[in-house]
Image: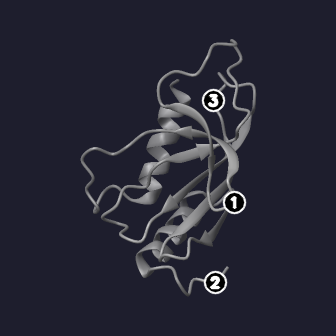
């Protein structure tokens, strides 16, 4: 995809995501405001879920790396094997430029450090949190 409207920091973040998640497909779409919507497909899920894998999507906004990568979304049909409801931090909402259905994972970084809290570290933290639910 074209990176003409995406900042250099975001282009670098996408490259880091592709390196870290090299066994998946990482795609992106410009958000038209200097940022990008990113989808990583397919991420393995924890054994607690009926589904074995999901995509994970998020927006990296123009002020990145000073802005948090928030929120993140996974497949809309995410279900626990034990039938229990998802706890706090989960919400079914449309996401992205096309209003696609998804499950929002609300995990805001309260003490953002741009040197440490990259898009990749955010995704890894959220995936760890998801596996512990």
Rendered residue at 27%/52% (across/down): 112
Which residue is denoted by mark 3 in the rendering? 46
Rendered residue at 44%/66% (across/down): 61
Q: In terms of secondary structure, where does tag 2 sit?
A: loop
Find residue 7 and report its horizontal and vertical position in percent. 45, 80
Could you tell whether 7 is left or right of 130 in the image? left
Find residue 110 and report its horizontal and vertical position in percent. 28, 44
Rendered residue at 43%/55% (across/down): 69
Q: In terms of secondary structure, where does tag 1 sit?
A: loop
Rendered residue at 30%/64% (across/down): 66
Residue in the foreground of this view, choosing between 43 and 69:
69
Q: Are marks 1 and 2 in contact (CB under 8 Å)?
A: no
Which residue is denoted by mark 1 in the rendering? 98
Q: Does label 1 or label 3 sit earlier along the sequence?
A: 3
Q: Do the residues labelled 2 and 3 touch (CB within 8 Å)?
A: no
Could you tell whether 6 is left or right of 93 in the image? left
Residue in the foreground of this view, choosing between 25 and 106:
106
Which residue is denoted by mark 2 in the rendering? 2
Q: Quadrant of residue 27?
A: bottom right
Q: In this view, does 87 lie above or below 124?
A: above
Could you tell whether 37 is left or right of 110 in the image? right
Q: Does label 2 or label 3 sit earlier along the sequence?
A: 2
Could you tell whether 112 is left or right of 2 in the image? left
Q: In terms of secondary structure, where does tag 3 sit?
A: loop
Kindly report the distance in space between the C-alpha atoms of the residues bearing marks 2 and 3.
34 Å
The mark closer to the camera, 1 or 2, is: 1
């Amino acid at each position: 995809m074209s990176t003409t409207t995406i900042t250099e920091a975001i282009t670098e973040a996408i490259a880091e995501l592709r390196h870290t998640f090299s066994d998946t497909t990482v795609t992106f779409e410009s958000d038209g405001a200097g940022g990008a919507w990113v989808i990583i497909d397919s991420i393995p899920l924890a054994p607690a879920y009926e589904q074995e894998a999901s995509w994970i999507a998020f927006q990296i906004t123009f002020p990145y790396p000073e802005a948090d990568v928030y929120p993140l979304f996974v497949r809309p049909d995410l279900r626990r094997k034990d039938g229990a409801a998802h706890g706090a931090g989960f919400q079914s909402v449309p996401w992205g430029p096309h209003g696609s259905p998804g499950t929002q994972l609300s995990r805001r970084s309260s003490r953002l450090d741009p040197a440490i809290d990259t898009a990749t570290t955010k995704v890894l933290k959220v995936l760890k949190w998801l596996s512990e639910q």
